[in-house]
Image: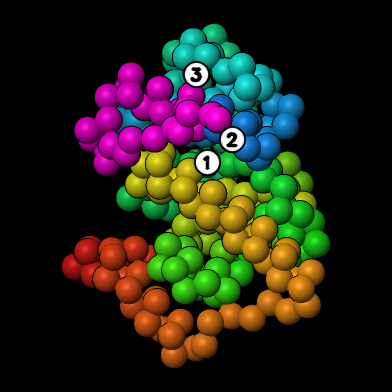
Amino acid sequence: MRAAVRIHAPHHGDGSLAVLRRQMLEIARELHSRGWVANHDGNVTVRLPGDRLLATPTALSKRVLLDADLIVLDGADRVVQGGRRPFSELKLHRAIFAARPDIQAVVHCHSPCATGLSVAGVAVEPRMLGEACVSLGAEVPLLPYGFSNGPEQVAALAKAALDFDAVTLENHGVLAWGVDLEQAFLRAELVEHLASIQLAAIQAGRVRTVPAPDLERYLQARTRAGLGPEARRKLAK
Ligand SMILES: [Zn+2]
């Protein structure tokens, strides 16, 4: 059996660069071993001080990624550390970081169930399970197809990032973000898990959601847990 990976969660400020690098490698390998990426797919970023990002590079499998392969980008997305090149989906990550000052990490993958639903034009439905609504809110939006991370898709993502913590992209995959790498990874994991449940429910004939009054209670629990736009508005006051 594979050893369990605990991606210890430093909240911003207390994660040294060495710790963040180790966590990023753990997550990258996890994305590969779970079959959520193939070939050179998927990418992970963490915000560093001074608008810099620690990132996985392009053109390398997550299976073989080593510490020396990770890159640090400056505010203009120039590589200032490491010998590899940045990935083309960087604009999507930057849109999320710009929209959400609280967010420190972004995970992108092509996990098959969530991506399959995106191909079918179906959004992942957190309202199937009350607990999922506490973690992700009532919606994981499906953003319209956009060619190669073009301006429309970047704009749609920047808008969605204000209210949500994960999205799927039509005919593409999953983006999830969090206050640290662990939370971003867990959100991507939950989106894929929900998608697999949803597919089973579709096969069984019907996707039912929790009753509306209970949904409201789960969403209140989400706000009490300090999650979601309403909690952030309260915190900002
Ligand atoms: Zn992708």
Q: Residue at x 66, y 19 (%)?
A: 60
The secondary structure type at the circle numbered 3 is loop
Residue under label 3, please give it: 70
Q: Residue at x 52, y 72 (%)?
A: 129
Question: Toward which corner of the image does residue 47 lie, by quadrant?
Answer: top left
Which numbered disc flags the more N-terminal residue, 1 or 2?
2
Q: Would you say 103 lies left or right of 57 here?
A: left
Which numbered disc flags the more N-terminal residue, 3 or 2?
2
Contact check, label 1 and label 2, Cβ < 8 Å = yes
Residue at the limit of the structure toward the front, as seen here: 1
Q: Nearer the viewer, residue 100 or 62?
A: 62
Disc number at residue 31? 2
The secondary structure type at the circle numbered 2 is helix
Contact check, label 1 and label 3, Cβ < 8 Å = no
Q: Which region of the structure is painted magenta?
A: 1-28
Question: Toward which corner of the image does residue 15 lie, by quadrant?
Answer: top left
Total labels: the figure holds 3
Residue under label 1, please give it: 107
How far apart in space, not on screen, are marks 3 and 2 (Cα)?
Answer: 16 Å
> Which three-letter amino acid code belongs to the residue tagged 1?
Val
